Amino acid sequence: MGSIGSPNDQLKVLVTGAAGFVGQELAAALLNDPKVSHITLTDIVEPTVPATASPSKGRARCVKADLASHEARESLFTPDLDCIYLLHGIMSGQSESDLELGLKVNVDTVRAVLDLLRRTNIGVKVVFPSSLAVYGPANDGEIISEKTVPMPQSSYGAEKFMMETLINDFSRRKLIDGRIFRLPTVIVRPGAPTGAASSFASGIIREPLKGERSVLPVSRDLRMYICSPWTLVKNLIIARDIPAQKFGPSRTVVLPGIASSVQDMLDALEQVGGKKALDLVEEKVDETTNRIVASWPADFDFSRATSLGFVPEGTLLENVQEYARRYVKG
Ligand SMILES: NC(=O)c1ccc[n+]([C@@H]2O[C@H](COP(=O)([O-])OP(=O)(O)OC[C@H]3O[C@@H](n4cnc5c(N)ncnc54)[C@H](O)[C@@H]3O)[C@@H](O)[C@H]2O)c1
């Protein structure tokens, strides 16, 4: 049982979905964290050690594996692990268009991993990123918190909520030490567009800042609950270190973010990239995307996160400026 056995500065950590967006950002931070002695990065796509983590590359092991495989799970989820970040998954748009795949990855692999852990690594810390997609549409003026009854309007949201429930129950039984976080939509994401219905929110900033066109598939007044990757990663590290008893009867926490309209995003784009960047955004409403994203609430009370020690999000402009500083050349 690594979580009990290892001293606090010798943590053995496993990150699934480590070739993904959050996985890569988190891996870089974990590799620069002196508390972590060993880190395994795994994904169905060969994960790499992020370049920004170069001084500590030696502590990382990269494993290409499909978590639907029993053998892969048995070899990866060893009893010496102290903390596991379960980041792998099929995102909202793809889970909606391919129900079988969403269920297989977002439910079956997570259930299988949790079952393995409760038998072989009792009490291990499991950090699970859930989503605001567990909620249904908010009433006018309604502020959402952990106390709001989830009513998912997408298969992705339903799958996340099912796994939240299981992790809460296994934590109540002290089989694992689960930590469940309802993430805002994380922007600005570098790289390529994704299967997430919210993919456009990064795309309308990322593509124009590199001089490429981007389609805006929702209306400008649509509001979203968002946070930056940098705030999220800080909070995912804090998530690991919170004493279990501080959570009380529920392990579920809404992470800090800010409410932002699509217009706010376009304004931030214009401030950072100028009118020439803004002109590259083409408005073409896609009803499915609009429906899914509009069903997610935007106004959250994250005071539980604040009381647990999580850090707040900065402004949208700071987020876009930081993205440009890190990823936009010239
Ligand atoms: N990015 C966001 O805005 C956001 C918001 C809320 C919640 N989340 C959650 O955070 C986590 C990470 O999100 P992300 O944006 O990095 O997603 P991502 O799509 O970039 O990464 C997910 C990774 O899971 C991997 N994966 C899929 N099937 C797998 C399998 N069978 N075996 C092993 N790996 C598999 C993929 O290859 C991918 O690299 C996800 O669970 C997501 O649901 C993200």
Image (cartoon, rainbow, N blue to C red):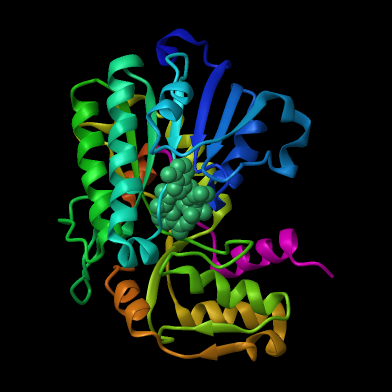
In front: 26, or 302? 26
Q: In which quarter of the image is residue 246?
A: top left
Picture layout, residue 165 above or below residue 326: above
The single residue placed furthest to the right in the displayed view is 330
In front: 92, or 28? 92
Q: Which residue is drawn at 68% across and 38% down?
A: 49
Residue 249 in the magenta stretch? The answer is: no
Say whether residue 62 is visible: yes
Say whether residue 256 is visible: no
Q: Where is residue 171 in the image (x, y as percent from the top left)?
A: 24, 27
Q: Where is residue 236 in the image (x, y as percent from the top left)?
A: 48, 40
Q: Which residue is drawn at 29% across and 55% down?
A: 100
Picture layout, residue 219 above or below residue 304: below
Picture layout, residue 69 above or below residue 243: below
Left or right: where 75 falls relative to 104: right
Which quadrant is home to the C terminus?
bottom right
Q: Residue at x 34, y 73 (%)?
A: 293
Point out the stretch of residues depicted in magenta: 309-330
Q: Where is residue 285 in the image (x, y as percent from the top left)?
A: 41, 88
In front: 187, or 271? 187
Picture layout, residue 175 above or below residue 180: above
Q: Residue at x 48, y 69 (%)?
A: 199
In front: 7, or 96? 96
